[in-house]
Image (spheres, rainbow, N blue to C red):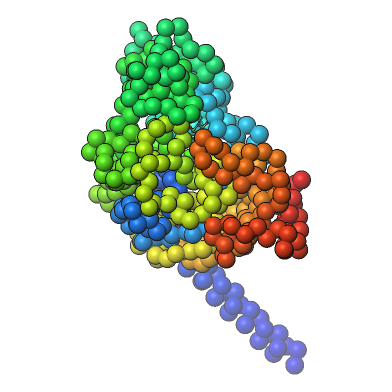
């Protein structure tokens, strides 16, 4: 009896083993076909959850971004790690929670490189799989060692954290230096007119927004009253470098052209492009052909401009024959703000538009509008369109794209949520720690828990609630999208569980 049974099992075992192998092979081949897609991250600056028509905006039409959303996965629980730029950018490029790095705060234009050159980064991961890697647009992660001479080769920077090609603005559009930097060299610099930058003190005889308001075409509201460039008073002082100075109104076209050239040059081999647009961050400087188009002032106009630019970029992917072999990820580094330091009619002309999409808070806030942002994945022919409520974060691109590429990556914080990114399921993160100005809070399931903090609950200048309170806060986001009802007192059990989970992740 033993022998026939044994043989039966052996045959069955072999049969199953064979099936499994075939299945694996089939799976493998399938993955291999799509194993080396190009990947493009289109990253906006301060775009809010409610700023796009595909996310419910009715006062603005963003047809090109809508096309990505309607043809891809549109996430309703997609998060930046942080409510400001530098930390979010640190998170997306390293896969590490920025609050683990005490220096990951909004950086001045003269800050040293925040990512260490031996740190694992997204471009490094792509390069390990034979990709060419490029960045076009906003950097804001520091350059050099803190004592940059802008007239010589600037290093380390994006190229030293494994971007093969870089064409960047150093920090933000409102910070000096107001020049483009290509592969570590200031573009268009005349050695006879060297450029100098200082964040502490002005250069003698140089006009400032504070002392020479008559020289400004855009008026500062708070901060932003140092050196004047193109009529716009900025943060920080600059001298010289006239021939290298960028044109603000041409910036969107300029970055677009660089991104298009990058695609054209690299279309024959796999590439990863991080395309970081400057809109709708201040100063908002739409090209004249977009001025007045939104009826909402320059903030609306630059959103329309960004949408147009993205449409043009997508056309290039199509014309160059790589559209169906390119995964496009669209998101924003943090939530919206109207007046972020200039009088530019953003507040006065907002009308019925709600950049927050009904969420509470905004940029700089631990409330939802700080970090919940538009988040779209689009891959023509591969991703079946859907709306997903899976909890995903930009730090997850590292582990997820590593899975897509079959790269060997171990990161502490990044989670592999590739199935959600490809629209094949809603299984994703169980929880996430979000951050605003170094304070953190927990998103888990339907819940948001904000620990008790000392600090300013309301930022007068920007008119935004920070989410800071001396009492614990607990919100059920499914029932309370606008976070109006603090359930910390009425649901102590839930609060206790979330606080303990929060401490576990943070290692407190
Ligand atoms: C703040 C600026 C703000 C903006 C922000 C950075 C002042 C008063 N405010 O310090 O205008 O530049 O930094 O924005 O200077 S972020 O999106 O790059 O994080
Ligand atoms: Ca930002």
How many numbered callouts?
0
Question: Please, is residue 329 above or below residue 428 in the view?
Answer: above
User: Front-most of 262 and 224?
Assistant: 224
Q: Say which quadrant the N terminus sits in.
A: bottom right
Res. 266 visible in picture:
no
Q: Is residue 295 left or right of residue 422?
A: left
Question: Please, is residue 61 above or below residue 198 in the view?
Answer: below
Please report the residue visible at 71 percent of the width from the left and 45 percent of the height from the top: 470
Q: Position of residue 400 (x, y in %)?
A: 53, 54
Q: Is residue 492 left or right of residue 190?
A: right
Q: Is residue 142 left or right of residue 505?
A: left
User: Front-most of 25 and 385?
Assistant: 385
Q: Return the residue found at the far left.
A: 289
User: Front-most of 353 and 11?
Assistant: 353
Please report the residue visible at 51 percent of the width from the left and 54 percent of the height from the top: 359
Q: Position of residue 96 (x, y in %)?
A: 61, 43
Q: Return the residue found at the far bottom.
A: 1
Q: Quadrant of residue 101?
A: top right
Q: Position of residue 246 (x, y in %)?
A: 34, 25
Res. 495 visible in picture:
yes
User: Front-most of 366 and 484?
Assistant: 484
Q: Say which quadrant the C terminus sits in.
A: top right
Q: Quadrant of residue 262?
A: top left
């Amino acid at each position: 009896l033993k022998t026939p049974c044994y043989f039966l099992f052996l045959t069955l075992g072999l049969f199953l083993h064979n099936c499994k192998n075939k299945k694996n092979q089939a799976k493998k081949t399938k993955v291999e076909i799509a194993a080396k897609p190009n990947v493009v991250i289109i990253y906006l600056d301060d775009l809010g959850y409610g700023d796009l028509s595909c996310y419910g905006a009715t006062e603005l039409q963003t047809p090109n971004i809508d096309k990505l959303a309607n043809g891809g996965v549109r996430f309703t629980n997609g998060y930046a790690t942080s409510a400001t730029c530098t930390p979010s950018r640190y998170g997306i490029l390293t896969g590490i929670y920025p609050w683990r790095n005490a220096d990951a705060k909004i950086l001045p234009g003269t800050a040293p490189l925040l990512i260490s050159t031996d740190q694992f980064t997204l471009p490094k991961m792509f390069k390990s799989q034979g990709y060419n890697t490029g960045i076009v647009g906003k950097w804001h992660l520091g350059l050099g060692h803190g004592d940059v001479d802008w007239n010589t080769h600037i290093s380390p920077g994006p190229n030293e954290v494994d971007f093969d090609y870089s064409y960047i603005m150093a920090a933000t559009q409102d910070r000096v230096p107001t020049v483009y930097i290509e592969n570590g060299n200031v573009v268009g610099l005349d050695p006879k007119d060297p450029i100098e930058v200082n964040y502490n003190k002005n250069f003698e005889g140089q006009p400032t927004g504070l002392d020479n308001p008559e020289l400004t075409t855009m008026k500062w509201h708070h901060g932003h009253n140092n050196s004047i460039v193109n009529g716009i008073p900025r943060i920080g002082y600059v001298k010289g470098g006239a021939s290298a100075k960028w044109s603000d109104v041409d910036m969107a076209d300029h970055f677009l052209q660089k991104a298009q050239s990058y695609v054209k040059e690299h279309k024959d081999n796999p590439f990863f492009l991080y395309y970081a647009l400057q809109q709708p961050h201040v100063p908002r400087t739409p090209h004249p052909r977009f001025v007045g188009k939104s009826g909402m002032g320059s903030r609306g106009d630059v959103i329309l401009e960004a949408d147009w630019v993205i449409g043009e970029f997508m056309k290039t992917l199509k014309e160059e024959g790589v559209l169906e072999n390119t995964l496009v990820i669209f998101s924003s580094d943090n939530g919206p703000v109207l007046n972020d330091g200039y009088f530019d009619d953003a507040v006065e002309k907002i009308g019925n538009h709600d950049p927050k999409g009904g969420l509470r808070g905004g940029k700089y806030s631990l409330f939802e509008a700080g970090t919940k942002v538009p988040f779209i994945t689009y891959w023509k022919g591969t991703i079946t369109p859907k709306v997903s409520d899976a909890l995903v974060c930009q730090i997850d691109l590292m582990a997820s794209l590593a899975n897509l590429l079959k790269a060997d990556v171990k990161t502490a914080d990044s989670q592999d949520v590739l199935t959600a990114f490809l629209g094949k399921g809603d299984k994703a993160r169980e929880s996430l720690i979000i951050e605003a100005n170094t304070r953190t809070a927990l998103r888990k399931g339907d819940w948001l828990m904000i620990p008790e903090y000392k600090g300013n609950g309301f930022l007068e200048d920007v008119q935004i609630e920070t989410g800071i309170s001396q009492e614990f806060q607990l919100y059920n986001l499914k029932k309370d999208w606008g976070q109006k009802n603090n359930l910390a007192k009425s649901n102590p059990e839930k609060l206790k569980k979330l606080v303990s989970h929060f401490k576990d992740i943070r290692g407190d």
